[in-house]
Amino acid sequence: MTSTHSKNTQSIGNSELRQYRAIAHKLNPVVRVGGNGLSPGVLLEVNRALDDHELIKIKIAVGDRAARDELISELCATVSAGLVQRIGNTATLLRRNPESDPRKSNLQRQI
């Protein structure tokens, strides 16, 4: 089940959102959030991954659906990223970086 997207991605058209989801389908989660929640180390790693890759998946293993949704909303607000989709325990985040390395960016390189 996919949750509604955040306000950072509301300005993105449906066709562009579908493209992001198609790209993300092939990706593996690069950050895992566990029982400690949004620790400074997790936030640092999410920021680094977004700077490098722009479009990332994260795995969230905390509580029930409401707790996961709240944590995802807090994470998106903290790192200034948009939620592309959430399926189960996996969320796909997007934060464009005009200075990203084309060899690392999931939006610029062929996967």
Image (cartoon, rainbow, N blue to C red):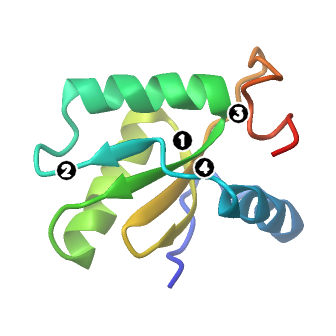
In the current view of this chain or complex, which residue is farthest to the bottom?
1
Three-letter residue code for mark 1:
Ala
Give the alpha-carbon distance from disc 2 to disc 4, as whole Å: 25 Å
Query: Which residue matches tag 4?
Result: 8
Q: Nearer the viewer, mark 4 or mark 3?
A: 3
Give the alpha-carbon distance from disc 4 to disc 3, as whole Å: 11 Å
Q: Are marks 1 and 4 in contact (CB under 8 Å)?
A: yes
Give the alpha-carbon distance from disc 2 to disc 1, as whole Å: 20 Å
Q: Nearer the viewer, mark 2 or mark 1?
A: 2
Is 4 situated left or right of 40 in this image?
right
Query: Which residue matches tag 2?
Result: 34
Residue 65 drawn above or below residue 105: below
Three-letter residue code for mark 3:
Arg
Q: Nearer the viewer, mark 2 or mark 4?
A: 2
Mark on residue 32? none
Secondary structure of the residue carrying numbered label 1 = loop
Q: Could you say which quadrant of the image residue 88 lies in?
A: bottom left
For the point 60% across and 23% down, which residue is it? 51
Q: Earlier in the sequence, mark 2 or mark 4?
A: 4
Is 49 situated left or right of 23 in this image?
left
For the point 22% across and 39% down, which residue is it? 38
Query: Which residue matches tag 3?
Result: 96
Q: Could you say which quadrant of the image residue 10 lies in?
A: bottom right
Secondary structure of the residue carrying numbered label 4 = loop
Could you tell me residue 84's position as x and y percent? Answer: 61, 60
Is 70 situated left or right of 51 in this image?
left
